[in-house]
Amino acid sequence: MKQFMIYEHPTKGLKAVKVGWSWPAFFFGIFWMLYKTLWLLVAAIIGASIVVAMVIPADALMANIVANLGFLAFHLVVCAKGNGWYEDRLQSRGFAYRHMVEAKNVDQALAFYAQPGNDQGHGSSGGEGADALPSSTLPNTGKPSGDGSDSLKA
C-alpha cells in the first residue's frame, strides 16, 4: 500500500498526493511538471538548458558529459522531491492538508477519504471531523510528522 496526503479546497475539492518517489515525474519529466503547474521548476530547467547550451561548445565532449550528468542528477532530485513540491503548490493555492491515507492508487485514496461514516474522512459524523487536522502534524506546516500515527488504511 502507498501513502497519500489528502488536501481539500473549499471550491476545488479534494486532491491526493503520493508520498515519496514520483514515477510519473521520472518517465514524463517536464510534461509532469507542467501538468502539476510547477511553473518555477519548469522555468528553471528551461533557463538552465539555455545557459548550458550557450556556455558549452558543441564539440566539447567532456563538458557535455558533465552537463548531462548534472541534468540527470537534477531529474532524480525532481523525482524524489517533486510530490513534496506539488504539495507546497497546492497549499499555496488554498488547499489544506486533511489526512494521510494508505491506498493502492489516487482514486482509491480519495474514495476512502470521502466515504460517509469514515471517522477521519470527509462527511464523518463524529471523531475529529473533516475540518480538523490530525494531532501529529508538524508546527506551521499542516503536514504530518511522518510517524504514521495519523494514517488510515483502505
Image (cartoon, rainbow, N blue to C red):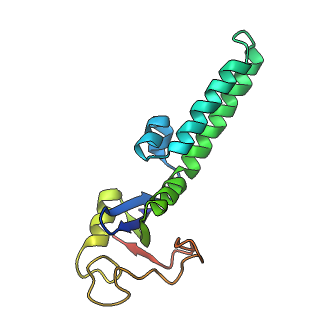
- 66 is higher (above) or lower (below) than 1: above
Residue 83 % position (x, y)? 50, 54
Q: Is residue 37 above or below residue 89?
A: above
> Is 13 displayed left or right of 54 in the figure?
left
Taking depth in this image into account, of 141 and 16 the one nearest to the observer is 141
Location of the C terminus (image quadrant): bottom left
Eyeballing the image, is 57 above or below 29? above
**Residue 31 in picture, x, y percent from top left:** 44, 36
Extreme-bottom residue of the structure: 126
Kindly indicate the quadrant of the structure image that contains residue 47.
top right
In this view, which residue lies farthest toward the left? Answer: 116
* 52 lies left or right of 118: right
Q: Position of residue 94 (x, y in %)?
A: 42, 65
Residue 142, how many percent across, how many down?
A: 52, 73
| 152 on left or right of 148 | left
The residue located at (39%, 75%) in the rendering is 152
29 vs 145, left or right, is left
Q: In which quadrant is the N terminus drawn? A: bottom left
Give the number of callouts. 0
* The quadrant where residue 74 appears: top right
Which residue is drawn at the image coordinates 49% and 56% (left, top)?
A: 89
In this view, which residue lies farthest toward the top? 59
| Nearer to me, 78 or 92 | 92
Q: Residue at image x 50%, y 43%?
A: 39
- Residue at the image position 62 percent from the left and 45 percent from the top: 77
